[in-house]
Image: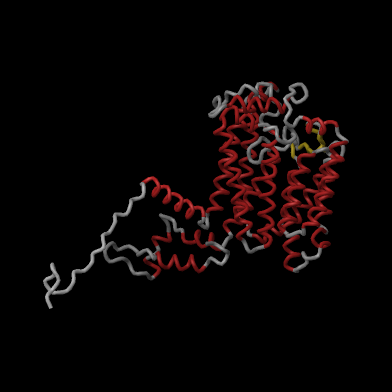
Amino acid sequence: MPGSPGSRTGRPPAQRTVERPVAARPARENSLRNLIVRARRAWDRPLTAYYLILGGSLLITVLGLVMVYSASQITALQMALPGSYFFRKQLLAAAIGTGLLLAAARMPVKLHRALAYPILAGAVSLMALVQVPGIGMAVNGNQNWISLGGSFQIQPSEIGKLALVLWGADLIARKEDKRLLSQWKHMLVPLVPVAFMLLGLIMLGGDMGTAIILTAILFGLLWLAGAPTRLFVGVLSFAAVIGAILIRTSPNRLDRFACVGSTDVDKCWQAVHGIYALASGGLFGSGLGASVEKWGQLPEAHTDFIFAVTGEELGLAGTLSVLALFAALGYAGIRVAGRTEDPFVRYAAGGVTTWITAQAVINIGAVLGLLPIAGVPLPLFSYGGSALLPTMFAIGLLIAFARDEPAARAALAMRQPRFGRKRAGGLASGRKPDRASGREPRRWNTMRRRASAARPSGER
């Protein structure tokens, strides 16, 4: 048969498909997608929560020391004290708190549970001593301090927050192991009566702000324990009624509620000048140490309203940085509580996260004029050693829990020091050196198998 035209073999020519050029994606889109993928991978690593807690708390504490030094100079000079007086006391408290943080971070979980009852007993004893004449002392109208001699004082109610977290977590964990949480009486007793006893001792001194934080911790523990909605709403309603009665019977508390969103300088001096400080800061602030409101216009500039001075001196960038650090700390605490299999770790991590987050929200909300002024310090940031020490111990708890995750333990175990006995002693362990360099070969595959085999805790 005659071949078709254009074909030497007599076969019809093959039909060639014309390939259309694929439109190249913009370089910006690819780089953005790669950046998102890398961020997700870094965010999902086993040690992410550990680094967030350690780094976030360290940055908040260091920045708080700087702002305490800046905001307290004028107050110290007005009291005929050296300008660095409050800074030196805060630095001493931070040094002691660092020791407590490291100790708590190295303690095993069993030791934390064993310390729950002694800390609770000590907190209750100290809070009872506050009401003894000659031992307790009043500061700003609240009878909740004990003098240690000289200029050193202690506020036992701050220890009560830590005591409620540890004791409540241990109590609920024990009942969960015995499968008793399905009964409402075991859910409430003795957790709620003990919490109300602490609240009563605090309210005897008139400290409404600390009582609110303690109530938030109680509700956080009940929520994590899986309290039924009706039970949860019932306890919340009872606490709301008690709080309303305490507010209505105190003219000072009524005035604080009336100052929410108010611009009356005569009646709401502290709240309005806090807004003035934030408004005058602008985007990047007036400069470190250049605050105007701290020159006698803003009361408690280095304690309850230190966030306002931060906004005036560091601007919107500084305040957003502080908010981002607290948000990262809260996320890390929730992640630790959500990924653990130990009930005590879950409740304790959730309680600490509720404590720090609620206190930060109440303090910042009061400075912004969105909430009534409760008189609570900004955690790890405001001046006050009594608040700093228990908070840093609680941060050490979170660090210990983050390190105790199986995937985090495997990741930490894979790390070897660059210089030390482990690398130098590799040849003596029976491994064959590399022929080309004479060094011990890196066994990455073995490490990966160990890491993947030690991830039963939900790590992805």
Rendered position, 162 above or below 365 = below
Front-lying residue, 22 or 425: 22
Judge whether residue 131 can be spotted in this image. Answer: no
The residue positioned 67% from the left and 33% from the top of the image is 368
Judge whether residue 109 can be spotted in this image. Answer: yes
Q: From the viewer's perspective, is 21 left or right of 213?
A: left
Residue at the bottom extreme, as displayed: 1
How many marks can you see? Answer: 0
Percent position of residue 102, x then y: 60, 50
Percent position of residue 13, x then y: 18, 69
Q: From the viewer's perspective, is 177 left or right of 42?
A: right
The way the protein has been coloured in the rendering is: secondary structure
The residue positioned 56% from the left and 38% from the top of the image is 321
Percent position of residue 294, x then y: 65, 24
Front-lying residue, 415 or 173: 173
Q: State which quadrant residue 128 falls in.
A: top right
Q: From the viewer's perspective, is 348 left or right of 182?
A: left
Rendered position, 198 above or below 65 = below
Q: Quadrant where the N terminus lies?
A: bottom left
Q: State which quadrant residue 89 falls in.
A: top right
Front-lying residue, 128 or 191: 191
Percent position of residue 340, x then y: 62, 61
Rendered position, 260 above or below 51 = above
The residue positioned 36% from the left and 50% from the top of the image is 25
Front-lying residue, 206 or 223: 223
